[in-house]
Image: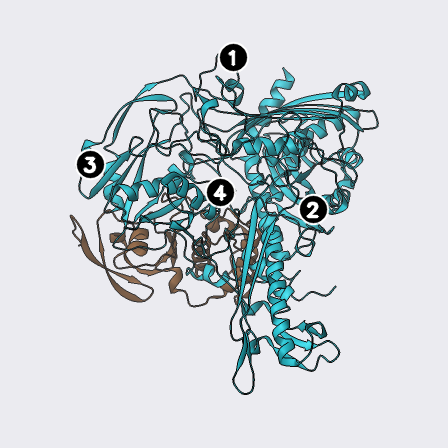
Chain colours: A cyan, B brown
């Protein structure tokens, strides 16, 4: 099939705004009416607040208000309402917001913030997920079972630090162990880390005299912001208007409602005047949500030929001091717990637990990256125990149509894709035939490692997306959607889908970049690599709706039945004589007869989409359908290890994934490469370091290191395209997936090269050296 | 010599124009550009010199505007992303898909432009040395490297 716009590397619609500095993000407006909020944060990781002295701060120049947790005590959270936006009574992590100072200038607010004095009665801390479940562990939340739930499917355990427990019980585990000829076990640790979107979080709010709340924020979730603010402040949904312009990166970190509460509270405290809170990088890391920690234990059973017979998985998900979306990520790990392998006997317990650390929220991969690290290291351990080739054992167990997921969803070619084909391509691209380990010089080992992944979304079962297409009188079209442009070229990809459906040149599709909940059609939120799929379906429906209207107007103009007409290049022509046509421009705002009388009016297409047949996971067995389809893939890394000092250099990183259909190849390739880069950052350097008092010690980009230019390997991306029949033009989500298995592939290679088992992230030269020394002693 | 105790008016030469700007002695150049002149192409990413999102050119050399006081910029030629006149590096960033969210892009482009001006024949090591002062969290850097190389290669030797 020949496509007009789909499958083309269309330049993103906002490209020139972005390379000229004209692109406007949330904090890129200044105005004399603005007041500035600065947050005072906790210096104690766990403690009762004895006293907050705001008097000095309140009397400083320019200060208009100082608010603390007592000002408007509410509890928030997208899964369970356990978090006050400003600490109330006690603090549960270092960096927790305790007060907000509002002043005429940011400098005045910052100066006054230093004068807010808080004293604490220190409490013992919970320092890791494993400590959280110890019998005598200090409790972060004394009444966790009494919090209001935001969704029914969350199961907090009274008098514990366990906020959620999800189970998978599939098949007969005992039979699985009986059938096993080899059993391997492993445990894995991943630290908390941070999203480090280049645009730090910021939000602006004001309240009109009639009660309307107007918010401008850097968010992936304008509609949830509207909903939560409307609930917490008692407004109609329509009386809360949320504007989201371009967002400077998010990676899941801007998918929950955070700073918006503080901006609204700050505005309320100064009579509704407009307040902006732009936080520093230090606060962005320490005070606002980060990536979960994970401690995992896996036990696998297999026959000698490599066939998996049993899998037992325990995932301890450290969500920090508050749940936010931690419980959902525990669900996500459980529902995909086996990795993309056929396993009939599965037992998984995923516990989401509190620790005295910065709380966590969604992070690229939504739990699947951490889970995949553990699973894919295990597959290499199993291969070693069986003396099998790591690629071969994956190929042997790769999930196929007819198999079922851990939540017992039946897999088809359409909803699964073709993992086998991904493995084959990745194997070739990494030159696997040259061997997993090669000695390439004195103290130099070149090693290769592989990993596979799969991911589906963990969306609410009623998550919906909509689109509206309006036509201009020149025949061009405007596309409005509720998805935010956070970077992945989402809106341009959607414009390509519309261009294809309307058979209209992409230059004639105009896309509104800003989302305004007052007029943008609804979208669940811009997360889970689901926007192309969900909004794309809505765009298709909106295009069909518009085309129906165009065809019926054209039929009047061309004196025939709509069925006699076809759409081609922004025109409508007779099927049997394409030389005779009418331009969209002549009917887009109604058709004007020669005598001037007009029939019809502006063509407006509407479409919406909700994923069918999703169901929550059963509390006892996990049975259910959390997501619509899988995106599977295979990854590989080539690394050179110096065995004299254990430094290493990553030479090549490969991802092959089944994208169903690639709508914009260069944009998609960039997403997968960027995700690989982030994954290699997690593998090699990224971690939040808490000291003995659980104070976060690396809150700047000088001490929290990310990948820099020149450190990158050669990135190679290739596709398999097995159509997802539910997706627009067959597309599957792909924006997160490059991150999922790349750290495992690297550690599989390094473990092999160094002859030790590297089961925790990140891996420094020192980590390898210590392991080797341990092995020697 | 400039003497200031509280707020005062200074003159800055920005993008070829002389602009009068009211600043405090402690205001950074980044602050003055963004909050006083509406030149928001330079972005705050860390305000600590670690990320390069606020990079501008000072007398043709890349400088992190968060690490410089506005008063220190008096007497120098400042170029911000808004002052570029369609140099090839912008086109190269577009063609090579060298950005996603776009937040770090003005800083990267200004640094690249400084490199192109000062080392038109820069080799890979020089490119890396220069651009290591900027962070991009969306791309893999492979795209940015491709963009800068495509411009450097077009330059006459």
How many residues crowd around disc 1 within 10 Å: few (fewer than 14), some, or many (20 or more)?
A: few
**A234 relative position to A309: left or right:** left
Element at label 1: loop
Which of marks 3 and 1 precedes in the sequence?
3
Q: Which residue is denoted by mark 3 in the rendering?
A: A58
C-alpha separation, residue under disc 4 versus residue under disc 2 = 27 Å
Quick one: A342 or A142, which is closer to the camera? A142
Name which quarter of the figure residue A514 lies in: bottom left
Choose the circle earlier in sequence order: 2 or 3: 3
Q: Is residue A327 left or right of residue A7?
A: left
* Element on which disc 3 rests: helix
Residue A92 position within the rendered picture, expressed as x and y whole percent measured from the top left: 40, 25
Q: Which circle's residue, 4 or 2, is located before the other in the chain?
A: 4
What is the tally of numbered marks visible in this picture? 4
Q: In which quarter of the image is residue A412?
A: top right
Q: Mark 3 lies on which chain?
A: A
Which chain does the numbered disc 4 sit on? A
Pointer 2 residue: A656
- Frontmost of labels 4 and 2 is 4
Which residue is more in the foreground, A593 or A55? A593
Q: Is mark 4 on a helix, strand or loop?
A: loop
- Marks 1,2: beta carbons within 8 A: no
Q: In which quarter of the image is the C terminus of chain A?
A: top right
> Which chain contains the residue that carries disc 1?
A
Q: Please identify the residue farthest to the bottom as the structure is shown.
A: A595
Say if mark 3 contacts mark 4, CB within 8 Å. Answer: no
Query: What residue appears at the point 52 percent right and 68 percent down from the top-left corner?
Result: B156
Image quarter where the N terminus of chain A lies is bottom right
- A72 vs A561, left or right, is left
Q: What element carries label 2?
A: strand
Q: Position of residue A98 (x, y in %)?
A: 32, 31
Residue positioned most to the right:
A305
């Amino acid at each position: 099939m020949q496509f007009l716009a789909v499958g083309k590397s269309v330049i993103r619609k906002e490209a020139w705004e972005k390379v000229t500095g004209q692109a406007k993000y949330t904090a890129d407006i200044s105005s004399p009416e603005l007041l500035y909020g600065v947050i005072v944060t906790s210096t104690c990781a766990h403690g009762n607040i004895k006293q907050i002295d705001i008097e000095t701060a309140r009397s400083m120049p320019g200060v208009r208000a100082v608010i603390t947790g007592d000002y408007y005590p509410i509890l928030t959270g997208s899964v369970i309402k356990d978090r006050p936006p400003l600490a109330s009574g006690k603090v549960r992590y270092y960096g927790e917001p305790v007060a907000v100072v509002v002043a005429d200038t940011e400098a005045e607010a910052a100066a006054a913030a230093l004068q807010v004095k808080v004293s604490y009665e220190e409490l013992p801390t919970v320092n890791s997920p494993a400590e959280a479940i110890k019998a005598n562990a200090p409790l972060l939340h004394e009444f966790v079972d009494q919090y209001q739930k935001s969704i029914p499917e969350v199961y907090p355990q009274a008098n514990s630090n366990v906020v959620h427990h999800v189970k998978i019980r599939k098949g007969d585990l005992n039979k699985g162990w009986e059938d096993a000829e080899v059993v391997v076990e492993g445990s894995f640790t991943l630290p908390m880390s941070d999203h480090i979107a280049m645009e730090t979080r910021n939000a602006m709010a004001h309240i009109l005299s009639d009660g309307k709340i107007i918010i401008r924020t850097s968010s992936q979730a304008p509609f949830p912001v509207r909903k939560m603010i409307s609930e917490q402040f008692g407004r109609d949904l329509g009386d809360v208007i949320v504007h989201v312009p371009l967002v400077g990166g998010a990676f899941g970190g801007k998918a929950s409602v955070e700073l918006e509460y503080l901006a609204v509270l700050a505005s309320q405290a100064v009579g509704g005047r407009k307040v902006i809170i732009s936080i520093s990088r230090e606060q962005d890391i320490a005070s606002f949500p980060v990536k979960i920690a994970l401690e995992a234990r896996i036990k696998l059973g297999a026959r000698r030929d490599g066939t998996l017979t049993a899998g037992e998985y325990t995932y301890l998900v450290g969500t920090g001091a508050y749940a936010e979306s931690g419980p959902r990520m525990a669900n996500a790990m459980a529902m995909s717990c086996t990795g993309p392998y056929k396993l009939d006997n599965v037992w998984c317990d995923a516990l989401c637990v509190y620790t005295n650390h910065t709380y966590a929220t969604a992070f690229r991969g939504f739990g699947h990256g951490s889970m995949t690290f553990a699973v894919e290291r295990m597959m290499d351990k199993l291969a070693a125990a069986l003396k099998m080739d790591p690629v071969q054992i994956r190929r042997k167990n790769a999930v196929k149509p007819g198999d079922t997921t851990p939540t017992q969803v039946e897999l088809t070619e359409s909803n699964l894709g073709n993992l086998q084909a991904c493995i084959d391509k990745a194997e070739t691209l990494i030159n696997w035939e040259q061997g997993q380990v090669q000695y390439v010089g004195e103290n130099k080992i070149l090693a290769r490692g592989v990993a596979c992944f799969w991911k589906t979304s963990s969306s609410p079962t009623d998550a919906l997306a909509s689109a509206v297409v309006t036509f201009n009188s020149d025949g061009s079209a405007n596309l409005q959607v509720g998805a935010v442009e956070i970077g992945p070229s989402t809106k341009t990809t959607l414009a390509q889908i519309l261009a294809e459906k309307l058979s209209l040149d992409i230059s004639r599709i105009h896309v509104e970049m800003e989302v305004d909940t007052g007029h943008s059609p609804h979208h669940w939120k811009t997360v889970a690599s689901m926007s192309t799929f969900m909004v794309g379906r809505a765009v298709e429906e909106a295009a069909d709706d518009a085309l129906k209207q165009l065809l019926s107007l054209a039929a009047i103009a061309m004196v025939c039945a709509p069925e006699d007409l076809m759409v081609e290049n922004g025109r409508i022509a007779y099927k049997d004589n394409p030389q005779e046509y009418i331009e969209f421009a002549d009917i887009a705002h109604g058709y004007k007869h020669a005598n001037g009388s007009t029939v019809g009016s502006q063509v407006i297409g509407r479409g919406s989409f909700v994923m069918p047949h999703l169901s929550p996971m059963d509390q006892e067995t996990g049975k259910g359908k959390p997501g619509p389809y899988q995106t599977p893939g295979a990854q590989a890394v080539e690394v050179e290890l110096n065995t004299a000092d254990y430094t290493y250099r990553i030479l090549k990183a490969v991802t092959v994934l089944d994208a169903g259909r690639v709508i914009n190849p260069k944009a998609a390739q960039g997403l997968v490469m960027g995700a690989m880069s982030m994954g290699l950052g997690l593998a090699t350097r990224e971690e939040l370091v808490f000291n003995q008092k659980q104070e976060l010690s690396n809150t700047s980009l000088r001490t929290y290191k990310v990948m820099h230019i020149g450190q990158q390997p050669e990135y190679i991306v290739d596709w398999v395209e097995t159509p997802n029949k539910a997706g627009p033009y067959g597309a599957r989500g792909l924006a997160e997936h490059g991150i999922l298995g790349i750290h495992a592939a690297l550690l599989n290679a390094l473990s092999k090269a160094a002859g030790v088992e590297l089961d925790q992230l990140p891996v420094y030269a020192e980590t390898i050296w210590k392991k080797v020394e341990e092995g020697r002693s | 010599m400039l003497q200031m105790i509280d707020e005062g008016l200074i003159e800055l030469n920005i993008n070829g124009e002389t602009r009068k700007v009211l600043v405090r002695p402690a205001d950074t150049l980044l602050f003055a550009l963004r909050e006083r002149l509406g030149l928001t192409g330079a972005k705050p990413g860390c305000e600590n010199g670690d990320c390069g999102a606020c990079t501008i050119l000072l007398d043709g050399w890349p400088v992190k505007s968060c690490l410089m006081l506005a008063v220190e910029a008096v007497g120098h030629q400042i170029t911000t992303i808004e002052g570029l006149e369609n140099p090839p590096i912008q086109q190269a960033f577009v063609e090579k898909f060298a950005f996603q969210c776009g937040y770090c892009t003005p800083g990267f482009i200004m640094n690249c432009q400084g490199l192109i001006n000062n080392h038109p024949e820069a080799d890979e090591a020089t490119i890396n040395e220069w651009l290591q002062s900027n962070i991009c969290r969306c791309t893999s850097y492979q795209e940015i490297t491709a963009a800068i190389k495509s411009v450097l290669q077009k330059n006459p030797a």
